[in-house]
Amino acid sequence: MAAPGKRHQLLLYARLFAMLRPPAFFIALLCGVLWWFAPRIPLFSSELAQVLLLVVIVLCGLLFLYTLVGPALSYVQCRPTHLLVSTPLFRMAVSYARIRNVRPVKFVPPNLGWSQRRFLEPFLGMTVVSVDLKSYPLNEKLLRLWLNPYMFASDVSGLLLLTRDWMATSRDIDAHRTAWKTRNQSLAPASPLSGLR
């Protein structure tokens, strides 16, 4: 059995966590300061206000820790039998039998609003790997709930994989697909008519 390939980090998730990290830290810090001085501030002196501040501190602290761990959990990796797409909350195995084609495309999502453009600015015009699929492994609507919307190709059924090195990602997928096809062909039973001449 072939070894798993390299983990290629998904940059959309790395960007998302990088944008969430500072606000989560500073909100937790600000609420911590308010909680510390709450007994001396009339607005926050009630027990309910102090409990609410503690809740916000815990939630923002957990979010901050999550933003540190999240990028390491967001990657695409070739396995011997499938392509693994991993995000912090969702993992999807795409069988090589589903993959129709792997090709480079420019990352130019249409109709971006101001906030989407700010989020995607570092990646606009970059080359990404488009994995064209015969069909999605799960219902597309369900997948769109769990995956970043900019991971879906607009022209075909497929996924856009935005990684640091699109060529290495593409080569890795092609090499594992070829190895998978070779193994399957060698395991396939010979046709009974193949011996007839």
Image (cartoon, rainbow, N blue to C red):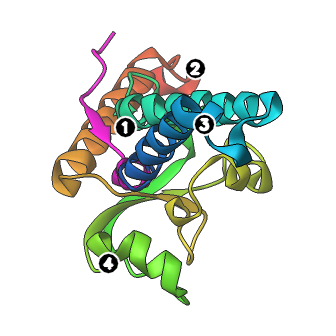
Q: Which residue is mark 3?
A: 40
Closer to the camera in the image, 82 or 77: 77
SS for callout 3: helix
Whether residue 85 is visible: no
User: Hey, what amino acid is under mark 2?
Assistant: Pro
Q: Which mark is residue 124?
A: 4
Q: Residues within 10 Å of mark 2 (few under 14, many from 20)?
A: few
Residue at point 56%, 78% (across, down):
155
Residue 107: quarter of image = bottom left
The image quarter in which residue 47 lies: top right
What whole-number distance in Å separates the C-alpha atoms at marks 1 and 4? 20 Å
- Whether the magenta-drawn stretch holds residue 91 is answered as no
Looking at the rendering, in which quadrant would you find the N terminus? top left
Q: Is residue 14 left or right of residue 56?
A: left
Upstream in sequence: badge 2 or badge 4: 4
**Residue identifier under label 2:** 192
Sequence-wise, the earlier of marks 3 and 1 is 3
